[in-house]
Amino acid sequence: MNKQRPKISLQEGIIVLLTLLSIMAAGIIGLGITPEVPILFGIMLLIFWAWLRGFSWDDIHESFSIGIKNGIVPLFIFLLIGALIGVWIATGIIPSLMVFGFKLISIRWFLPSVFVVCAIVGSIIGSAFTIISTLGIAFMGIGLTMGINPAMVAGAVLSGAVFGDKSSPLSATNNLSAAVADADLIDHIKNIMWSTLPASVVAFILYALMSQGNGHADLHRIQGTIQTLHQNFNITPWAIIPVILLFICAWSKIPTIPTLFINIVVSSGIGMIQDHRLNLVRLNDVIQNGYVARTHNPQVDTLLTRGGIAGMMGTMSLIFVALALGGILMHLGIVDAVISPLTKRLKSDGNLITTVIATCIGVNIFIGEQYLSIILPANAFKKTFAENNLAPVALSRALEDGGTVINYLVPWGVAGAFVTNALGVPTIHYLPFVFVSLFSPVFSIISAYTGIGIKHLKPVK
């Protein structure tokens, strides 16, 4: 006979979540330590709380499995991205993009230029992670050489990548949001522009204003960096081939994992053809341990010493413990205890949409997984949206504006941890400059209360 699982009340669920949030905030923000230990401490307290509340050890252990299972595919993708970063540096692809970028990107309007380029390419590729780990690293190098605050550059890169992620039919989060809300994908993308475009216009203006103080870059320093790159890497127009290959794979609807495998193989082949020193043994070391730059230029060395499977282990360990925490919160019913009562008390469009956005943000904070921040609120609020005459695209937009874009701003979130690892800028530092992520929920809430861009199933009487 199976023992009945304990029922978690709304008050108890709120107390548990606030306690966890306080622990993580005190450690990460208050003490300035990395997120892993505060999260592990929170997991420890949750385990003993669950045991005292009457949950079986089997239930608790199963929670870990459920949580980590949700992150297996993203974790594997991160391994491949680590390998791709190492290969793209070793074969001169990222250094070449940096050199070309110095010639093409406006120095005076650097931040808005970065935002626009990442947004355009991201809209074509449909993968924010790919933009961040390729073009993002190149733009970080240019920005550092120009003496621009790395957090600002990271914010511009990320805003462009997020715009691309929200506007592309190839985006995994776009497809997921539309699917779980039962919305048409193209209708979803059109409707999400009601919040995305205003947020992007504000972002562009702010980046333009921020660039005004960066118009007097040290040209001698830029020339020195270009010379360093030419002396230590193979700078070649052939570097554009792997970038074009990303476009081809994206438009051929090849999934992320085989796309990364193809690009690693092709990039390695190009590198080996052009540089006889780059043999299979050397490539194996780069893929496993990343690239170590020794150019005698400290700034270039810091930027281009990265990548490899081993280089992703720190990010993956953080994501691993965050997923375990999310599994416990979900499987033991703590998240459901807080979300379920909300769905019964909301009637107006503005309150309902705002609550969905807030719930998505909450799931991001407490669970740290981008996909779950979309799936859980969708399942909780789908019926309520239909009862309130709101179209599926109204729900799918709220899921994107509170779920997809916010995960990049959470230090222990899957996306936030990835960005910090790839660009070398702590999440807390770049957070104030990711304007598309910050303003998308704001414009979505304004739209909800004004009724502008809100779709209904039938005319409201």
Image (cartoon, rainbow, N blue to C red):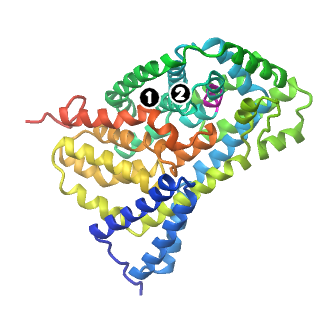
* Secondary structure type for disc 1: helix
| Nearer-the-camera pick, 362 or 217 | 217
Can residue 91 be seen? yes
User: Which quarter of the figure is the N terminus placed in?
Assistant: bottom left
**Location of mark 1 (residue):** 167
**Location of mark 2 (residue):** 122
Q: Are marks 2 and 1 in contact (CB under 8 Å)?
A: yes
Mark 2 is on which residue type? Gly
Q: Which residues are magenta?
A: 134-139
Mark 1 is on which residue type? Ser
- Magenta stretch: includes residue 56: no
* Secondary structure type for disc 2: helix
402 sits left or right of 27 in the view: left
Residue with the most extreme right position: 276
> How many marks can you see?
2
83 sits left or right of 395 in the view: right
Residue with the most extreme left position: 461
Can residue 184 be seen? no
